[in-house]
Amino acid sequence: MKKTIHSKEYDALISWLTAARKRKGLSQRDLAKKLGVQPSFVAKTELKERRLDVVEFVRICGVLGVDARKGIGEIGK
């Protein structure tokens, strides 16, 4: 089994999250500041260089004001 970070499902999830950030008009730096993390955290996540865990995902969704369940739904598409 290949690592999930290299799967089409993970790609869809991160693409959805990145699009949500952009729809909110936030830069990676803006999102990082709201999360209290370094900008590299957001950049590496969006570039799929680091794996996002479920707690981080839900936290980011909360900051962006999006429904995490909708993001999870992207995995099945």
Image (tube, grey):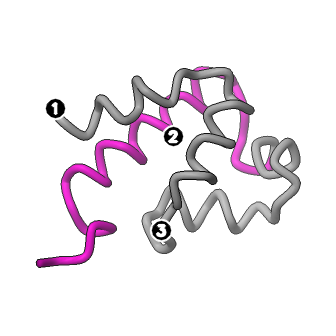
**Prevailing SS of the magenta stretch:** helix
* Residue type marked 2: Thr
The range drawn in magenta is 1-29
Q: Quadrant of the N terminus?
A: bottom left
Judged left or right of residue 24, residue 51 is left
Q: Quadrant of the C terminus?
A: top left
Q: Badge 2 is on which residue? A: 18
- Give the class, few, some or many, for how many residues have Cα within 10 Å of label 1's Cα (few <14, many ≥20): few
Foreground mark, 1 or 2? 1
Q: Badge 1 is on which residue? A: 77
* Residue type marked 1: Lys
Position of 22 relative to 49 (above/below): above
Q: Residue at x 40, y 23 (%)?
A: 70
Q: CA distance from mark 1 to mark 2?
A: 17 Å
Residue 21 position, x and y percent, is: 61, 33
Q: Are marks 1 and 2 in contact (CB under 8 Å)?
A: no
Q: CA distance from mark 3 to mark 1?
A: 20 Å
Q: Badge 3 is on which residue? A: 51
Q: Secondary structure at mark 3?
A: loop
* Residue type marked 3: Arg
Tell me the number on the disc at residue 31: none
Position of 8 relative to 47 (above/below): above
Q: Secondary structure at mark 2?
A: helix
Q: Residue at x 85, y 42 (%)?
A: 34
Position of 66 relative to 60 (above/below): above
Disc on the earlier residue, 1 or 2: 2
Disc on the earlier residue, 3 or 2: 2
